[in-house]
Image: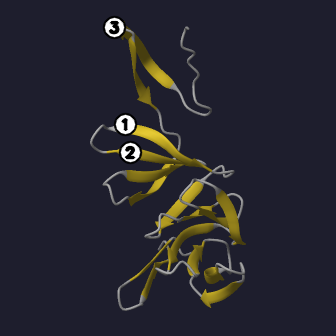
Amino acid sequence: SRPRWRRPSGSTWQGCAISCSHGAISVSASLRFELPYDLAILDDGAILFLDRGRILRLDRRSRRVSLYASTPSRELIAMERLEDGTLFVTDFPANRILRVDPTGRSSIVAPVAAPADLVVDPSGRTIWAASIAPGVGVVRVDVATGRVEPFANVESPHGIDRDAAGNFYVHDGH
């Protein structure tokens, strides 16, 4: 039967070339990213990165990009990965934090106004999120309950990280 080609939603193929030999079909295409943000390195060396509501996977050996997971978001900004493969991402326009399980299913963890970045403790029980919404600063999120509470009064924090000793570092965009 004849192969059917569909362009993935929200992407463009530029310069698409199809060649057939001995019944095999190969496609070479330029992939266009829409709004790439944060990244995470997997144990096998592949790189996950955010692009709008998608989490894409770049296989460094083959240099191929594939869809790792799709979320209901229009703009994912930050990502943290746990050892078990669970991802936590900030859904900036929807004012929330999402969990993406290792099978690619996403669920809402908690509402956080304008979440720009996040840090997750290694157990996956607590998230600290930097919000650029006026008056919010850094919040602490209990993953099990979704409870959000103030953590640090920082004006419009854009980035947050934590060192091995448990100290937090936040930059306020200034």
Q: Secondary structure at mark 2?
A: strand
> Could you classify mark 1 by the number of other residues whose Cα lies within 10 Å: few (under 14), some (14-19), or many (20 or more)?
few
Q: Amino acid at mark 2?
A: Leu
Q: SS class of the residue under badge 3?
A: loop
Residue 123: give its label: none
- Badge nearest the viewer, 1 or 3: 3
Residue 45's image quarter?
Answer: bottom left
**Contact, mark 2 vs mark 1 (Cβ under 8 Å):** yes
Q: Residues within 10 Å of mark 3 (few under 14, many from 20)?
A: few
In three-dimensional space, the C-alpha distance between marks 3 and 2, rounded to whole angstroms, equals 28 Å
> Crowdedness of circle 2 by 10 Å Cα count: few (<14), some, many (20+)?
some
Quarter of the picture holding the N terminus = top right
| Residue at 53% over, 40% down | 34
Q: CA distance from mark 1 to mark 3?
A: 23 Å
- On residue 58, which mark appears? 2
Element class at badge 1: strand
Image vertical order of residue 95 relative to residue 151, above or below: above
Q: Residue 62: x, y in percent?
A: 30, 37
Q: Position of residue 69 (x, y in %)?
A: 56, 49
Amino acid type, label 3: His
- Badge 1 or badge 3: first in the primary sequence: 3
In the picture of the structure, the residue carrying the numbered disc 3 is 22
- Which amino acid, mark 1? Arg
Residue underneath mark 1? 64
